[in-house]
Amino acid sequence: MHRIEAISREIMTNGFRCRQCGACCRGDEQTSRVIVSPPEIDRIIKATGLERNGIVVPYPEFIESDKGGRFTFEWCLRNEGGKCIFLAEDGQCSIYSVRPWICRTYPFALDGDTITISECPGIGEEITPEEADALATCLVKRQEAEEEEENAVLKIFSSHTIPMGKTVVFDSRGMWSIHG
């Protein structure tokens, strides 16, 4: 509990109020990359009825294997026309109730025990102690989920061989062959 309190205090010190401007949902693939885990993808599929390929693309930075294949880790939400595919015309998130951890906690993230803050117009705005506590709790849960995913991915990765000439994605549920 002490850790959440310390994170909450830091959030209070910096201040934050989401302006619902959608700035964090806009940008090219490099500047607005939203990494999502299989459980997050499942929730989005259930909420939208869309198929997996309509929601995510492989993380775009590939590593060449020694056998002529290439691989990457994890998935990213699709970004089309310089914005997240779930940013509606009215500027609101169309999957708000099932949005990924990164979206729930933006502009904050945890790097070990250090809080990092991305650029956002809402930084410096007043936040209530209750809102800061909720955000701090969410940040810790996000970090735990990310660590769990990373450990599972490492286990999967270490137990597979990348097929010659293939492109694959590793996530916590397996190795997935992709085209392209």
Image (spheres, helix red, strand yellow):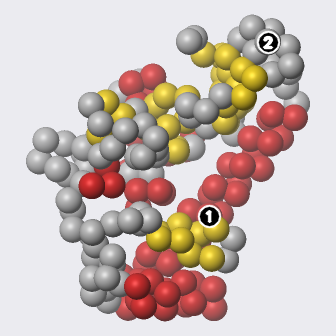
Q: Is residue 48 visible?
A: no
| The quarter of the displayed image where residue 49 is located | top left
Query: Going by the picture, which residue comes out furthest to the top?
Result: 165
Image quarter hosting the N terminus: bottom right
Q: Is residue 7 visible?
A: yes
Name the secondary structure under disc 2.
loop
Question: Relative to 150, is 25 on the left or the right?
Answer: left
Picture quadrant of residue 125: bottom left
x and y percentages locating residue 25 in the rendered image: 31, 49
Q: Secondary structure at mark 1?
A: helix
For label 2, the residue is 68
The amino acid type of the residue labelled 2 equals Gly
Q: Residue at x 72, y 49 (%)?
A: 150
Spot occupied by residue 20 in the image (x, y as percentages of width and height) = 21, 62
**Of residues 97 and 71, the one drawn nearer to the viewer in this rendering:** 71
Residue at (63%, 91%) from the top-left corner?
Answer: 2
Please, is residue 34 above or below residue 137 in the view? above
Find the residue positioned furthest to the left.
90
Residue nearest the observer in this picture, 164 or 43: 164
Mark 2 burial class by Cα count in 10 Å: few <14, some 14-19, many 20+: few
| 44 left or right, relative to 58 | left
In this figure, what is the number of numbered marks? 2
Image position of 3 with respect to 40: above or below: below
Residue occupied by mark 1:
143
Looking at the image, residue 109 lies above or below residue 154: below
Give the amino acid type for the residue marked by disc 1 in the picture. Gln
Residue found at x 56% / y 75%: 115
